Image (spheres, rainbow, N blue to C red):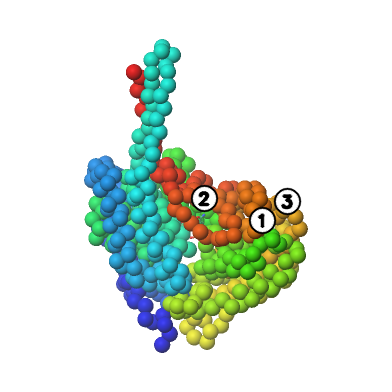
Amino acid sequence: MPAHHKMVVPHAGGLLRNYVAGEFVGSERTFANVTPVDGSTINEVCEADSALVDRAVAAAREALHGPWGKMSLDERSALLHKVADGIEARFDEFVAAEMADTGKSLWQAQNIDIPRGAANFRAFADLAKSRAGECFQSTTPDGGQALNYSVHKPLGVVAVIAPWNLPLLLLTWKLGPAMAVGNTVIAKPSEDTPGTATLLAEVMHAAGVPAGVFNLVHGFGPNSAGEFLTTHRGIDAVTFTGESRTGAAIMRAAADNVKALSFELGGKNAALIFEDADFDAAVEGTAKSVFTNGGQVCLCTERVYVQRPIFERFVAAMKEKAEALRIDWPESPDTDMGPLISHEHQQKVLSYYQLAGEEGATFITGGGVPTFGDERDNGAFVEPTIITGLPESARCIKEEVFGPICHIAPFDTEEEAIALANDSEYGLAGTVWTTHLQRAHRVAQQIDAGIVWVNAWYLRDLRTPFGGVKLSGIGREGGVHSLNFYSEPTNICIKF
Ligand code: NAD
């Protein structure tokens, strides 16, 4: 019996309901939640209609001025720690639900997604309590004094719209700070990953979060829960992670009543490998940055530029790494890569593999679909793929694939490397591999991206600013940046 049969997925064969005004609510319409591992249906999901979204908005508005608004910061913070405790107490259920929905590996779910789900509540519960204020004293024209200080109020009712690649992690990354500073929220997870968000609603309920503070609505984007939220007059802010073109659609929808927006969008991230890099560390780190979570992390590298003297050796070493990756049942402890999120996404990634061939790429490895001879042949698997030889104008170099693929190209000078990294409509992340201290600082500071790693990848400190430039987003979250986005300062000026 394959290892995956041992996992008990919460609500398997049942219904995933919405959570509105402190109650679990069904709906007339449901849709199937399908696992990409073997294409089977895990459970049915209740799709929220516009009337239910209206109810969620009304409940959130009421709670904003009711119990939540009256709660002290200390009490709110303690309650969010209790939510984190609740996630940890049901850790294995969260892991099983996340793996079933996404096909991500056990290692990834246990070590990254679910722990960060809890950490996001703890970090922002604490940060909100240690937030510094600002105060300015000045002389007035009549010779008196004026003291200016700011108080922070919640934004109001916040819609949190999340993608499927790191479902619990990215949802809670926004819920944590939004709730910590006193907002009420309506969460909409991706239609592909409704599992852990539903468990989170159960945890919120059990922790005693007052009715209406946290609401969950399931559904899709256009003409479904996503659009009902972004066009709703009762929503004060939309915080969104997902594709850049979805961000553009949300911006248009939210324009009519000028909602506050925070967007974390797509990327086409570059890694620059200099000949003075620690070669093995650069190969290891770059392979990780290309293939982690099947390349389905917004921070993943899809463009690799290597200084010419080490180019051939680097390509050969990357090929070895890619071919050593274990593609297997997600539940198997030594699996490196499971399937992609869905058959639809598998087709998108495969269409880029095909396009790469048409554009004239050389396939160093991969380019197809692995075969297993069991139920996994119905899954959404693709091979880890490395290509070379494309011109910089190729669509495969310009467009985000969001799969386990990278293109590797040579460069000669530092200036050329920087120009190549920046020649993109996106600007989310960049990675620099070098042991030259001055070069590390010089190059890192010239890359147009929200985050640049030197000799590392995917190290995250929740207190630091996170977001993207150009098509990769608007604004920054993380640490005080999150606290600032999710609240409105009012300046108080006192003359004396
Ligand atoms: P997506 O844009 O298709 O969907 C994201 C969410 O938006 C889903 O919940 C979806 O239902 C909803 N949605 C879709 N259309 C909508 C509309 N018109 N109105 C309101 N809601 C709508 O993204 P995805 O495919 O789920 O995720 C992958 C994308 O997310 C990639 O582009 C990736 O780079 C990006 N991403 C960015 C970050 C970051 O921090 N910058 C992190 C993770 C993923």
On residue 436, which mark appears? 1
Crowding around mark 3 (Cα neighbors within 10 Å: few <14, some 14 to 19, many 20+) is few
- Residue at 74 percent across and 59 percent down: it is 411
Give the quarter of the image for residue 48. Answer: bottom left
Report how many numbered discs are placed on residues in the image.
3
Q: CA distance from mark 3 to mark 1?
A: 15 Å
Query: What residue is shown with label 3?
Result: 415
> Along the polypeptide, which appears first: circle 3 or circle 1?
3
Establish if 201 lies above or below 465.
below
Does the closest atom of ligand 1 sit within 8 Å of the Cβ of label 2? yes
Q: Callout 1, which amino acid?
A: His
Q: Residues within 10 Å of mark 2 (few under 14, many from 20)?
A: many
Residue 34: percent from left, percent from top: 43, 72
**Is 294 rendered above or below residue 133?**
below
Residue 188 appears in the picture as rendered: no
Residue pictured at 43% horizontal, 73% vertical: 106
Q: What secondary structure is marked by label 2?
A: loop
**Crowding at label 1, few (<14), some or many (≥20) Cα neighbours within 10 Å?**
few
Q: Earlier in the sequence, mark 1 or mark 2?
A: 1
Mark nearest the camera among 1 and 2 is 1
At a point 44% along the width and 50% down the height, the residue shown is 463
The picture quadrant where one finds residue 26 is bottom left
